[in-house]
Image (cartoon, grey):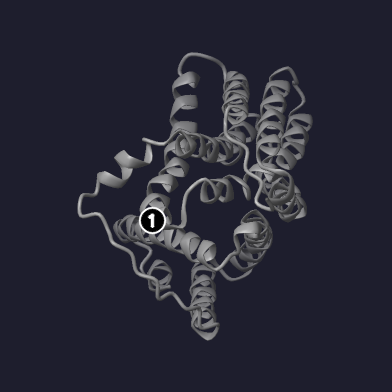
Amino acid sequence: MISYLLFAFFPNIYVIIALGILISIIGSLRITLFGIIIRDKTKDCSVAKTEGLIYTLSNLSWLVAPVIAGFIASKYGIKEVFILSAMVLLITSILFRFFKIKDNRKTKVDKNLLTPIKEFFQDKKRIYAYFIGGGIDFWWSLIYIYIPIYIFELGLNEKIIGYFLGAVVIPLVLTEYYFGKKAGKKGFKKLFIIGYSVLGIAAISAFFISNIYLILLILILASFGAGMLEPTTEAYFFDVITPKQRDKFYGPYNTTADLNAFLGRALPAVILLIFPFRAIFIFFGVAMLIFAFISSRAKEVIEKK
């Protein structure tokens, strides 16, 4: 909250860089601790359903907030957007205290920082969960980085980017709770395979299509496949570890999101040095099919059983 207020009143490039680094560090703490608290407060038979609800609400925010921010920025200015954001964070912290969420559990922490990472990759189930969990972050690099660049490259209005990014979220809002609930009852494996296959086929299909609007439509529809993955991959990880391992291994597991987001941005950039832009559709398509294959080798988990 304080960082956002500083953003508003000190629009200096050095302040922005420093605060950006600080927010990234705090963000990693929030993601890790929030996930553990959610898992601790959720019954073993409904982890996927709870994750589905959380991601549905999160994506609903991603759908609504940019609209509000865009309206305020156009009418009042960017400064007011950061002030409003700080107010929302203040309200959030007040609500967190108001609900009196108890978190009294304490665990023994490894003094060696590398020990949990080393031990994490000594179990096959955790390794599969790690790779499966990162694929969706790899995919979002195409949607949020390279498709906007492609739209600009074709000379289209920047409003098209806004419409596209807003539309991509809609299938997630509509389906993530349903797929999370279904995974808990029927199992994860089939959803992983179908979800990644849908993304892979969509990306490869986009390579053979010249109409940009049809490409955008295909990628928007592909979000139904993403809806099978985003709320279920983390739930699957929690289901293949024991309660005592949550604090120890959830941090190392979360690195898959950042690692795959980085690879999803860096590797296509290298490809674009050699091949035309459309080649990255094949790259992302093949990558998603590889994630689908990895999913087929993972152990099935059914929470209701």
Which one is in front, 121 or 16? 121
Left or right for 178, reference 105 = right
Q: What residue is disc 1 on?
A: 24
User: Which quadrant would the N terminus be assigned to in this image?
Assistant: bottom left
Q: Nearer the viewer, residue 224 or 181?
A: 181
* Helix, strand or loop under label 1: helix
Q: Hey, which quadrant is residue 263 in on the image?
A: top left
Q: Position of residue 227 (x, y in %)?
A: 69, 45
Q: Residue at x 76, y 33 (%)?
A: 218
Tell me, yes or no, if residue 160 can be seen here. Answer: no
Expressed as whole percent of the image width and height from the top left, the position of residue 228 reads 69, 43
Disc 1 crowd rating (10 Å Cα; few below 14, some 14-19, many 20+) is few
Residue 304 vs residue 119, the one in the foreground? 304
What amino acid does circle 1 point to?
Answer: Ser
- The reply to whether residue 267 is visible in this rendering is yes
Determine whether 139 is above or below 30 in the image. above
**Going by the image, does 36 lie left or right of 179?**
left
